């Protein structure tokens, strides 16, 4: 059967070429495919139809990406204060230690595949108001832009969630710890804000903190820590167990100290003038 003898019905944006093929009036490329033996002729997309289809697919993928990013941002527990913090909009008019930390943190994100495969971590410490939380929020947002699951939290919040798990119909203790132990990147902000020398809290939180950190250590899961204290001060002044501090030290391939006066206080004073 010769399909060339069949009646051809043209659309308003089509024309019949000299070779008996149907062409698009817009891009002048064929909308028919013909087999080598000339026996088969089937409809296909012209160039502008292909481009339109590709654009629609791109829009669909962009929507999926935006929805996933929105979901990851909500899952990250970042909060509204830092939801728009990025490396590009950081105020770099700060001490050299901060700008150096920004460069290293950005490189951490840029090399995420290596970071994840090797389980590299960061420990950032320094006085209150020097930009530690803002910096890790930038790491969080940068990785979420690349669809990396991140959780940013602190042990005061973890403690509250764990205690609530016994009274409320929410996640169980095991589910909470499992999520923190397995997330691609865990950012533990403000370690040491909780005093762990209190005997009533010692047996509960010390064990949970160690459990989370040790599981990430064993499985080489990247973890970022921030604190007002050095790792040694966490032991001496805040009562953190030595075994937990040792794990943090081993997981922290980069230790960055932010010094200087409180950027937050300086900014507030400038705004009041």
Image: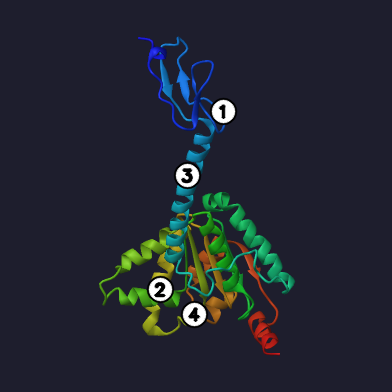
- Using the numbered discs, state the Cα–Cα distance from disc 2 to disc 3 in whole angstroms: 43 Å
Could you say whether the residue bearing mark 1 is in a helix, strand or loop? loop
> So how many labels did they put on this image?
4
Label located before the other in sequence (4 or 3): 3
Please tell me the numbered disc located at residue 56: 3
> Residue 87, located in which quarter of the rendered image?
bottom right
Please tell me the numbered disc located at residue 28: 1
Label located before the other in sequence (2 or 4): 2
Label located before the other in sequence (1 or 2): 1
Label located before the other in sequence (4 or 1): 1
Q: Are marks 2 and 3 in contact (CB under 8 Å)?
A: no
User: What residue would you read off at disc 2?
Assistant: 158
Residue occupying the point 59% across, 57% down: 109
Above or below: residue 62 compared with residue 28: below
- Using the numbered discs, state the Cα–Cα distance from disc 2 to disc 4 in whole angstroms: 17 Å
Q: Is 161 or 84 nearer to us in this picture?
A: 84
Graded by Cα atoms within 10 Å as few (under 14), some (14 to 19) or many (20 or more), the crowding at tag 2 reads some
Between circles 4 and 1, the one closer to the viewer is 1
> Which quarter shows the N terminus?
top left
Q: Is residue 231 visible?
A: no
User: What residue would you read off at disc 4?
Assistant: 239
């Amino acid at each position: 059967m010769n399909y060339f003898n069949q009646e051809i019905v043209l659309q308003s944006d089509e024309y019949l070429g000299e070779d008996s093929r149907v062409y698009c009036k817009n891009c002048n490329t064929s909308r028919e495919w013909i087999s080598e033996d000339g026996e088969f002729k089937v409809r296909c997309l012209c160039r502008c139809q292909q481009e339109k289809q590709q654009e629609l697919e791109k829009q669909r993928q962009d929507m999926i990406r935006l929805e996933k990013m929105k979901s990851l941002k909500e899952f990250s527990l970042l909060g509204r204060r830092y939801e728009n913090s990025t490396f590009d909009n950081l105020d770099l008019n700060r001490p050299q230690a901060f700008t150096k930390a920004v460069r290293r943190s950005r490189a951490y994100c840029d090399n995420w595949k290596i970071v994840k495969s090797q389980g590299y971590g960061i420990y950032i410490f320094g006085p209150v108001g020097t930009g530690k939380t803002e910096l890790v929020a930038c790491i969080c947002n940068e990785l979420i832009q690349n669809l990396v699951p991140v959780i940013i939290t602190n042990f005061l919040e973890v403690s509250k969630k764990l205690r609530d798990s016994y009274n409320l119909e929410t996640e169980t203790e095991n589910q909470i710890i499992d999520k923190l132990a397995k997330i691609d990147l865990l950012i533990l902000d403000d370690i040491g804000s909780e005093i762990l020398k209190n005997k009533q809290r010692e047996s509960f939180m010390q064990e949970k903190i160690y459990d989370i950190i040790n599981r990430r250590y064993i499985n080489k899961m990247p973890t970022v820590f921030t604190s007002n204290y050095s790792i040694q001060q966490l032991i001496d002044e805040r009562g953190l167990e030595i075994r937990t501090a040792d794990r943090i030290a081993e997981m922290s391939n980069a230790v960055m100290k932010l010094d200087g006066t409180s950027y937050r206080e300086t900014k507030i004073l400038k705004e009041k003038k």
